[in-house]
Image (cartoon, grey):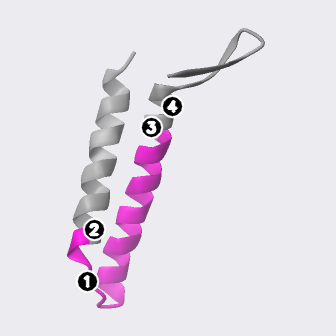
Amino acid sequence: MEIKKDKKLIITGKTICLVTGILSLIVGVYWLIRALFYDDTNLIAILSSICIALYLITYAGKRS
């Protein structure tokens, strides 16, 4: 997927995967901190956010 403006490449699928992976990692860290300090354990949210983040960041790194 590519978004072009005036024949210039603006956004690619690699950047979308990388940005969503980083955002998902931030959410996973948020849930992890919340579980450690506030004793509010939501294991499904922690594991799913971190697994999706690792997958998307790895996938964006493989794409060229």
Judge the density around disc 1: few (<14), some (14-19), many (≥20) Cα neighbours within 10 Å: some
Judge the density around disc 3: few (<14), some (14-19), many (≥20) Cα neighbours within 10 Å: many
Magenta highlight range? 19-44
Residue matched to label 1? 41
Q: What amino acid type is highlighted by mark number 4? A: Thr
Residue matched to label 3? 18
In the rendered image, the quadrant that contains the C terminus is: top left
Q: Which mark is residue 17?
A: none
Q: What amino acid type is highlighted by mark number 3? A: Leu
Seen as rendered, the residue at the extreme top is: 7
> Does 51 sit left or right of 11 as displayed?
left
Q: Secondary structure at mark 4?
A: helix
Whether the magenta-drawn stretch holds residue 64 is answered as: no
Q: What amino acid type is highlighted by mark number 1? A: Thr
Q: Secondary structure at mark 2?
A: helix
Rendering coords of residue 53 (x, y %) = 33, 49
Residue matched to label 4? 15
Q: Are marks 4 and 3 in contact (CB under 8 Å)?
A: yes
Q: Which mark is residue 46?
A: 2
| Marked residue nearer the N-terminal end (1 or 3) | 3
Q: Are marks 2 and 1 in contact (CB under 8 Å)?
A: yes
Q: Residue at 35% of width from left, 38% of height from top?
A: 57
| Marked residue nearer the N-terminal end (2 or 3) | 3
Whether the magenta-drawn stretch holds residue 30 is answered as: yes
